[in-house]
Amino acid sequence: MFAEDFNDDVVPLGAFSDCDHDVDTKEAYCVGLPEDYRAAWWAYPTGWPDTAKSGADGNTGRAVGGVYHPEDTLSVGPADDGSGDGRLHIRLWRPPDGGDVHSAAVVPRAVMDQRYGKFSARLKVVQPAPGYKSAWLHYGDGCEADFPEQNWTDTITAFHHPCSGEGQGYFPTGESWTDWHTVSTEWTPDSIKFYLDGRLVGQDTRSVPDQPLDWVLQNESALYGPYAAPGSSAQLDITWVAAYAYDGAQ
């Protein structure tokens, strides 16, 4: 359905801008992006509160939360390690004056509103710091599958929140964000399965979603533990992203 390796592309900081168009639909877009990236990617618009800031999903709202700012957190270009590999750079940061964390959530447009499939990426936190996390998810109507999720200074975990509300599935991997990993979520009519580097780390068959959902690569302020320090930053890099249909279902 969709694949991107970020090679031979440069999308400078600032290009993921003016994203408040047809939001949360397959027609959503960011005006500032080059045409090919505008067709492929959308980002949560500037000003939307992240989970910690909004108190969404039953959270109480933290004293330090975040606000989505795709224009100053997202860029595409060569790896900083000189490998020549192209990457999507997701650099979250908190202003020196102690304001809100600048968060980022990117969405592959081709698989918005898709039912079932396999969703994979290769990623690494190249600069960890307390107070920053990811929660990549499929979410809607009380159903949620999250992988990878957790603070970037902790280890990678998967969660499944059944649509019925009958308690979450919790699947720790014990693996660090600061190593390269391939993450995959396989969603079929019968189960949600989570794989790390090809190894099954968890599955759940309870109340599997049967409605189309978006795949959101959400990166934000932490929901527990230390707050991001004023003036701090942290960065996650992605080398490729791919998504597949399940038996032709979309």
Image (tube, helix red, strand yellow):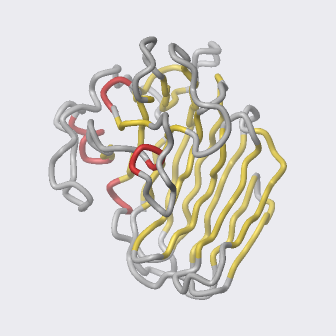
Outermost residue on the right side: it is 174
Instruction: Pick whichever, 25 or 116, lies toward us.
Output: 25
Q: Which residue is located at x 35 percent, y 23 percent? A: 72
Residue 36: x percent and y percent? 27, 39
Residue 2: x percent and y percent? 43, 56
Residue 217: x percent and y percent? 48, 49
Instruction: Pick whichever, 240 or 225, lies toward us.
Output: 225
Q: Quadrant of residue 49?
A: top left
Q: Is residue 1 left or right of residue 79?
A: left
Q: Quadrant of residue 111?
A: bottom left
Q: Is residue 127 left or right of residue 242?
A: right
| Depicted 70 relative to depicted 170: above or below | above
Instruction: Pick whichever, 196 or 166, lies toward us.
Output: 166
| Depicted 130 relative to depicted 165: above or below | above
Q: Is residue 95 left or right of residue 234?
A: left
| Depicted 153 relative to depicted 171: above or below | above
Q: Is residue 209 left or right of residue 110?
A: right
Residue 159: x percent and y percent? 65, 64
Which of the image's four quarters has the C terminus?
Answer: bottom left
Mark count: 0
Q: Which residue is located at x 45 percent, y 49 percent? A: 51
Q: Which residue is located at x 63 percent, y 51 percent? A: 149
Q: Which residue is located at x 42 percent, y 62 percent? A: 1
